[in-house]
Amino acid sequence: MALLELRDLRVALEDGTEIVKGVSLAVATNEVHAVMGPNGSGKSTLAYAIAGHPGYRVTGGQILLDGEDITEAGADERAQKGLFLAFQYPHAIPGVTVTNFLRTAINAVRKSKAGVDDPIPVKEFRADLFAEMDRLKVSRELASRYLNDGFSGGEKKRVEILQMAMLRPRMAVLDETDSGLDIDALKVVAGGVKELVGPEMGALVITHYQRILDYIEPDYVHVFVDGRIVEEGGPELALELEKTGYAKWDREEGKEAA
Ligand code: ADP
Ligand code: MG
């Protein structure tokens, strides 16, 4: 059974503008799917809708996690069920340290699993946190800083992956986690994702460029233009796109609109 399934998903902005125009795909554990598309095609809108952002309205279709319909579920409920979104533009939360944020998030997931409060022991948390920070080359100094407050672009993206590593979600959606990273940071981030994808986790890697896919080879590639999947294939499709770009489909879309 698919871990994450989108069935003819349609998403509109609050003003009613339809951005995602009927997307179907299914990601299983142990699989990496790439959604590749040009700027403005609706990739982040798709990611937000999957995560349950209240600013985006599902106007048709369904989102299923582990076979369960979560289309109407709140973002927190989805997270507790094991869905994780790494944001393209992570928000700063002044007043909340990275450590407190992570501990709160982990304990929320643990509580929902156990049915009662089941906070992670402090020693275990700290050991896990520092091990993951070292592995992902996140400076330990960031642990006591306010989340994303004054972080560089690269630090924000690494801390997104740190959150993923700590939370151990079932399904990770990464929205342009590669943008703004230099090659070394990209390798670290890609390595972090690759280590987690397996029998316990699947991933949807959303990207404009194929660069990150050199380090996380996708099992499936979905080309996404103007709110629709216009072509699907294996990893070779990503390489093809690197050469040709999206012009082919963009033109087709242009003709259709004209
Ligand atoms: P991508 O991530 O592929 O670049 P987005 O999903 O960010 O695309 O944006 C798709 C379209 O929807 C763009 O035209 C963008 O301006 C618009 N859009 C997305 N989110 C909002 C929002 N919160 N308010 C207004 N317009 C939005
Ligand atoms: Mg985007």
Image (spheres, rainbow, N blue to C red):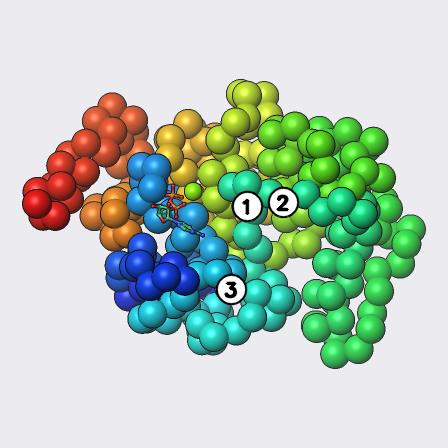
> Which quadrant of the picture is home to ligand 2?
top left
- Asked whether the beta carbons under mark 3 and mark 1 sit within 8 Å of each other, the answer is no
Q: Residues within 10 Å of mark 1 (few under 14, many from 20)?
A: some
Numbered disc 1: secondary structure: loop
In the image, is residue 100 above or below residue 51? above
In the displayed structure, does residue 185 sit left or right of residue 130?
left
Q: Is mark 1 within 8 Å of ligand 2?
A: no
In the displayed structure, does residue 45 sit left or right of residue 24?
right
The C terminus - image quarter: top left
Q: Estimate the spatial distance between the alpha carbons at disc 3 and disc 1, rounded to whole Å.
A: 15 Å
Tag 1: residue type? Phe
Tag 2 residue: 91
| Between marks 3 and 1 in the image, the one whose residue lies nearer the viewer | 3
Q: Residue shown at 56%/70% (left/top)? A: 74
- Asked whether the beta carbons under mark 2 and mark 1 sit within 8 Å of each other, the answer is yes
* Badge number at residue 54: 3
Q: Position of residue 63 (x, y in %)?
A: 41, 68
| Between marks 2 and 1 in the image, the one whose residue lies nearer the viewer | 2
The residue closer to the viewer here, 19 or 51, is 19
Q: Is residue 234 visible?
A: yes
The quarter of the displayed image where residue 150 is located: top right
Q: Estimate the spatial distance between the alpha carbons at disc 3 and disc 2, rounded to whole Å.
A: 16 Å
The N terminus - image quarter: bottom left
The residue closer to the viewer here, 219 or 101, is 101
Q: Estimate the spatial distance between the alpha carbons at disc 2 and disc 1, rounded to whole Å.
A: 8 Å
Q: Position of residue 163 (x, y in %)?
A: 67, 47
Tag 1 residue: 87
Numbered disc 2: secondary structure: loop
Q: Position of residue 229 (x, y in %)?
A: 25, 51
For the image, the number of numbered tags is 3
Q: Residues within 10 Å of mark 3 (few under 14, many from 20)?
A: few
